[in-house]
Amino acid sequence: MLANTRGFLWSDVETRALLHIWGEQDVQTALDGNFRNSHVYRDVAGRLGEMGFDRTPEQCRIRVKSLKRQYYQAKEGSRRNGHYHRVCKFYDEMERILSGRRSHGDAPDPSDVSAPVGDEDEDEEEGGAQKPGLKEPYTDSAGECSFTQQPVKLEYSSFPIPASTSNGAALSQSSAQTFSSPSASRPRRTKKRYSNLSLDKLMERLLEQSTVAEENFYKHEEQRLQLEDRRREAEHARELQMLQVLGQMFSGISSHSTSTAAPPTQTCPPHSLPHRHEQAPPSARPLVIERSFSLGGSAPRNMDSLLPLVRSIIPPLTPRKHKGQDGRIGIIGGCQEYTGAPYFAAISALKVGADLSHVFCTKDAATVIKSYSPELIVHPVLDSADAVQEVDKWLPRLHSLVVGPGLGRDDKLLRTAKDIVEKSKARGIPIVIDADGLWLVAQQPSVIHGYQKAILTPNFMEFSRLYEATHRKPVETSDIGQTALQLSMAMGNLTVVLKGAEDIITNGSSVIVCSHEGSSRRCGGQGDLLSGSLGVMAHWAFSAQGDTAKSVSPAMVAAFGACALTRQCNRQAFHKHGRATTTSDMIQEIGTAFQKLFES
Ligand SMILES: NC(=O)C1=CN([C@@H]2O[C@H](COP(=O)(O)OP(=O)(O)OC[C@H]3O[C@@H](n4cnc5c(N)ncnc54)[C@H](OP(=O)(O)O)[C@@H]3O)[C@@H](O)[C@H]2O)[C@@H](O)CC1
Ligand SMILES: Nc1ncnc2c1ncn2[C@@H]1O[C@H](COP(=O)(O)OP(=O)(O)OP(=O)(O)O)[C@@H](O)[C@H]1O
């Protein structure tokens, strides 16, 4: 550094450098009419530093303020006796700068020595008191008058400076040698509580307080988490207890249904597949157990009884597992027209918790689907000559299949899909059939008939096609639960999820209705989210150990979980996006919806 910058002493060289910077047009413009000036003085101090003078912004501000006071006092004095240079050494520099500024319409009242507060006062305490340690008690040069808030002795006493108060009353002559600061002659405003603390002290105190606050926050947070843990443990224990009761209940029901159920004539479809009895389970005489479910709605008991079943199939996240163990899911679908549907299904499967998600689609769909997401493994094989062999190569690695989203209705593709279904059945892989996969089933129900690891997820239109194909008559809607149950039976008691305002889930012997609150927004692709999620949950349910999932059919548990999740996503997305909700918005909600339903 070039100059002595210790304490508050300002050498003339340093002061001139300061005035040079402060007088620059951009600094004056920045100060002009700007109440907050700390940033300007930061800049000034920076520039001063570049010139070799180490000063803080606050020191610069105080120094300028002092110079301005001296200048105005001197100016007033000069009106009487012309000795202004004796009380303001830098009068000429100040005059040059401030007169330039006044020409911009910023003229303070020269008769008021307190006038030049303006832009230098921003950081000062109320009442005009300067911060201790920041006031400028000295100058290094004789002949320069400093200003403090205390009565000050004028260096050139033989030239009294009559100063006016702000209301214009002249100070008495007797006070010529000493005069009170403007603040002393005005009613002083109440000092702030910290006015006697330096800025550094204030900052220190603030930091201390925020550290204490932070520590308190973490302490409370820790207590909250401990409480939360305890609550979870208690809930978990309660769920386990309930599951045991449920398990006993269901085993009681199934033995009851085989012995005392109503005669089959009441519920069996009048028209059914020729070979439908071949694989029908003993519960072909159905007992309908209808449960409705609405979170926060009228049936909390049912919510309590079904959610734990879904929770029980969810594999825990543990560091001991390797990639792939929680699910490798395959989607059969995706053609030139439809690239969104297989993407929605595949990405939903991943987001629900599958580790790997494969899409087997046509060549021209593959690039498009890949471009949607690097997360998906996309095989452009479905329209190749050896499509079935290509997919078959992967089947040993796959835990479940979702057949149909965006498959289209091209005969060749449908034939390929049929062969893939056959191969998958032979391997015992759970198969979810949706969209155009259901079109295939409506054409050839035998493709999937009686396969207990199949789940069909028709919307009403698809359901009607299936019903008509199996019953040879229009769908009966007066008791849609019963009609769905009939379809399931006709298909060999595989699980049917009839999607709609309420999702009806049946395996031909019982019906579960999922009426969990969604929203009124319907957009293409919601069914794909459901089928993709169901792909994962079906794998989890069929591979779940223990009695829990076995007490209710694993497919039903998985279906209920996927329906509740889809609806929860719909609800959450609608809450955020309203009418503009799309399936992509719903997919964004999978993580939190899953947590809310199954992990909280
Ligand atoms: N972004 C994409 O790539 C997407 C691609 N997708 C893919 O499109 C392919 C064809 O699937 P799809 O569902 O459009 O065909 P299909 O079953 O013939 O239905 C056609 C007509 O049925 C009716 N209808 C539907 N629901 C009904 C209901 N609940 N209740 C009553 N009627 C109902 C309705 O008739 P409308 O009212 O228009 O007269 C509808 O237009 C398939 O591969 C699928 O995966 C979709 O996943 C969407 C996102
Ligand atoms: N009227 C409704 N009210 C509330 N939720 C509904 C309604 N209809 C459908 N859903 C929800 O949307 C999910 C998907 O059903 P949707 O009828 O949209 O399937 P989809 O037509 O096969 O869909 P996609 O457009 O993917 O082909 C259902 O499982 C259900 O959760």
Image (tube, rainbow, N blue to C red):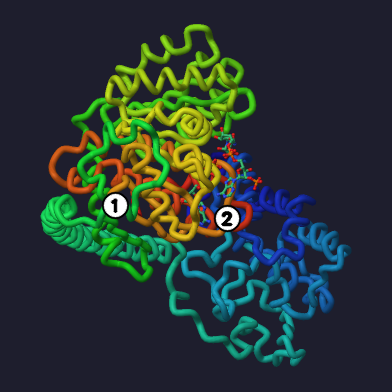
Neighbourhood count class around disc 2 (C-alpha, 10 Å): few under 14, some 14–19, many 20 upward: some
Q: Which one is in front, 201 or 539?
A: 539
- Residue at the far top in the pictured view: 385
Q: Earlier in the sequence, mark 2 or mark 1?
A: 1
The label shown at residue 385 is none
Q: Can residue 586 be seen in this view?
A: yes
Q: Where is residue 534 in the image (x, y as percent from the top left)?
A: 38, 39
Observer able to see residue 233: no
Asked which secondary structure carries label 1, the reply is: loop
Q: Nearer the viewer, residue 197 or 436?
A: 436
Q: Which is in the foreground here, disc 2 or disc 1?
A: 1
Task: List x then y, in percent, for residue 177.
Answer: 64, 83
Image vertical order of residue 319 relative to residue 262, above or below: above
Find disc 1 in the rendering and name its residue.
Answer: 510
Q: Quadrant of residue 167?
A: bottom right
Which mark identifies residue 521?
2
Query: Does the beta carbon of the residue at mark 1 sit less than 8 Å from ligand 2?
Result: no
- The vertical placement of 406 against 264, above or below, is above
Answer with left or right where residue 54 lies relative to residue 560: right
Q: Which residue is drawn at 27% across and 33% down?
A: 279
In contact (CB < 8 Å): disc 2 and disc 1: no
Amino acid on which the number 1 mark rests in the picture: Ser
- Compared across the picture, whether 428 is left or right of 550 comes to right
Q: Distance between the residues labelled 2 and 1?
A: 29 Å
- Amino acid type at image mark 2: Arg
Q: In this view, does 37 lie above or below 547?
A: below
The quarter of the picture where the N terminus appears is top right
Q: In which quarter of the image is the C terminus?
A: bottom left
Quick check: 386 left or right of 164?
A: left
Which residue shows up at 73% across the image and 53% down it? 27
Q: Position of residue 112 (x, y in %)?
A: 75, 80
Which residue occupies the foreground of this view, 59 or 600?
600
